Image (cartoon, rainbow, N blue to C red):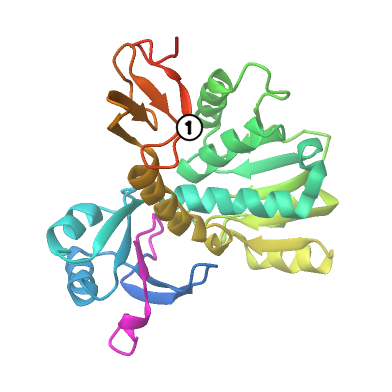
Amino acid sequence: MKQKKLGNYQYMIMTSTANNTNTNQLLPDRLSSEGAILNVQVSTDEFAKAVLQLVDGIIPHIFIDVERKQPVPLWQIAEETCLDSVVHPLKANDITVDAAISIVIKELKKTFSLNTVMIYGTGNLATKAALKLAEMGMKVILVGRNGNKVAQIVTLLNDILPSYTPWKIKAFHPDMVNKIDVFISAISAQKVLDESWLEYLQPDGFVLDMGLNNFSETFIDKILISNRSLYRVDIQAKIGTAILDLKTEDYFFSQIRGKIKWSNRTAVAGGIIGNENDIVLNRATPPYVVIGTSNGTGGLK
């Protein structure tokens, strides 16, 4: 950390992982259209506090992974330690899932909704990815070591899918005939998926490792020999959106949302529910556009 020119950074991200190899370490910077992001992974309270004390007041914005994948209470430590820098909650798994989906769409292009994806895993990453991909219209198959858990998750996800989702999520069956276009791993175990899974993949299909080193050496050798692509999900495909979200939120709360006096009347904007006959504006700062008159219950007269 001391070798880094901390003053050159506007943003830092502090994360943990569910993987047993999670350790205290400085990782390569995350790159985004909004600049480089200092990237720190932690596994102990002491290291998290030491890093935050070092960067507080130097790096203006610090993103804290609030998903409790380890017993370290990162958000609590950040709130207590950072007196000058602004800390922002970050759901790192959501960014990972969104990055994976971006890769899927980029690879399949406009035909993504005509393709089938199989996801190995029953945890946070796998279930979030399955739900989002199914909502987008892809055929989704879920597989895991515990068949009962897979069945429960599939039932739950199908219950909350939009009514007109074209395809229900299905549980994996070893005797399935139709091949898949995309295979996504989303587990914390290392090197457990062997080459037998390639039998289910189309000759022009591809594989995403959304966990960490999920595939065996033999699997990797075989897929590369077959000229099919194997990718590691890189959150840099989406990490910049966290910064853009900050800018969007700042603009919304400072320029759009508010309750003001306008032409001797009360006016509201940005989702604030006014009293009956209050004026509803498009924004709380000029230039204004009148949307209508409040009915007092969240709608317009």
**74 is higher (above) or lower (below) than 178:** below
Task: Answer left or right for 191 relative to 48.
Answer: right
Depth check: give the residue in front, 165 or 210: 165
- Magenta residues, dominant SS class: loop
**222 is higher (above) or lower (below) than 38:** above
Q: Is residue 116 magenta?
A: no
Depth check: give the residue in front, 146 or 292: 292
Query: Going 53% across and 21% down the picture, which residue do you hit?
Result: 160
Query: Going 57% across and 41% down the picture, which residue do you hit?
Result: 129
Q: Pinpoint residue 254: horizontal percent, then vertical percent.
A: 33, 47
Q: Pinpoint residue 210: horizontal percent, then vertical percent.
A: 56, 55
Query: Going 47% across and 41% down the picture, which residue do you hit?
Result: 123
Quadrant of the snapshot with the C terminus = top left
Whether residue 106 appears in this view of the structure is: yes
Q: Quadrant of residue 137?
A: top right
Whether residue 239 appears in this view of the structure is: no
Q: Quadrant of residue 48?
A: bottom left
Q: Pinpoint residue 164: horizontal percent, then vertical percent.
A: 68, 18
Pick out the residue farthest to the bottom: 3
Depth check: give the residue in front, 19 or 271: 271
Q: SS of the residue at dot 1? A: loop
Q: Which residue is mark 1?
A: 289
Q: Which residues are magenta?
A: 1-21
Q: Pinpoint residue 259: horizontal percent, then vertical percent.
A: 28, 31
Pick out the residue farthest to the right: 203
Task: Answer left or right for 208 relative to 177.
Answer: left
**264 is higher (above) or lower (below) than 106:** above
Quadrant of the snapshot with the N terminus = bottom left
Q: Amino acid at mark 1?
A: Val
Query: Going 19% across and 63% down the picture, which residue do you hit?
Result: 45
